[in-house]
């Protein structure tokens, strides 16, 4: 068993992320759209992590690039 591995086979919970100044506003990483209602957008937008930071994709761009997102392609490909 590799060092630092939990014997139960489960991974430990990551520490909570504290957004830095660049992550404070919710903006679509693809088209640059900002939500009118951030609470509603958290239900309909897709969130991903790229290079260690959270990125958001609006509902329209999420639908347009669904196969690429599901295929875990880097957003620079789409």
Image (spheres, rainbow, N blue to C red):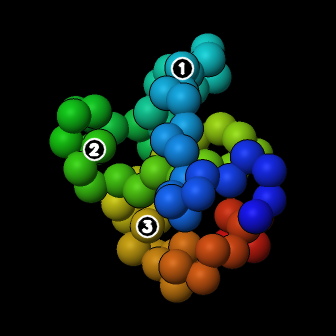
Location of residue 11 in the rendering, given as x and y in whole percent from the top left corner: 55, 53
Q: Quadrant of the N terminus?
A: bottom right
Location of residue 4 in the rendering, given as x and y in whole percent from the top left corner: 73, 46
The residue tagged 2 is 41
Whole-angstrom CA distance, mark 3 to mark 1, is: 25 Å
Q: Which numbered disc covers residue 62?
A: 3
* Vertical arrangement, residue 69 with respect to residue 56, above or below: below
Q: Is residue 66 left or right of residue 55?
A: left
Location of residue 46 in the rendering, given as x and y in whole percent from the top left corner: 41, 56
**Residue shown at 54% from the left, 20% from the top:** 18
**Residue shown at 62% from the left, 17% from the top:** 20
**Residue shown at 28% from the left, 44% from the top:** 41
Q: Nearer the viewer, residue 30 or 68?
A: 68
Asked which secondary structure carries label 1, the reply is loop
Q: Nearer the viewer, residue 24 or 14?
A: 14
Asked which secondary structure carries label 3, the reply is helix
Query: Which residue ends up furthest to the top in the rendered image?
Result: 21
Between disc 3 and disc 1, whose residue precedes?
Answer: 1
Whole-angstrom CA distance, mark 1 to mark 2, is: 19 Å
Choose mark 3 or mark 1, whichever is in front: 1
Q: Nearer the viewer, residue 66 or 15?
A: 15
Between disc 2 and disc 3, whose residue precedes?
Answer: 2
**Residue shown at 35% from the left, 53% from the top:** 45
* Residue 31 visible in the picture: no
* Vertical arrangement, residue 20 with respect to residue 3, above or below: above
Between disc 1 and disc 2, whose residue precedes?
Answer: 1
Q: Which numbered disc covers residue 18?
A: 1
* Vertical arrangement, residue 18 with respect to residue 6, above or below: above
Crowd tier of the residue under label 1, counting other residues whose Cα lies within 10 Å: few below 14, some 14–19, many 20 or above = few
Crowd tier of the residue under label 2, counting other residues whose Cα lies within 10 Å: few below 14, some 14–19, many 20 or above = some
């Amino acid at each position: 068993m590799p060092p630092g591995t939990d014997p139960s086979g489960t991974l430990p919970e990551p520490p909570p992320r504290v957004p830095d100044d660049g992550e404070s506003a919710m903006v679509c990483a693809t088209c640059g759209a900002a939500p009118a209602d951030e609470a509603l957008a958290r239900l309909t937008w897709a969130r991903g992590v790229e290079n260690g930071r959270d990125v958001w994709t609006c509902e329209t761009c999420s639908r347009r690039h669904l196969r690429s997102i599901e295929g875990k392609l880097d957003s620079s490909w789409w």
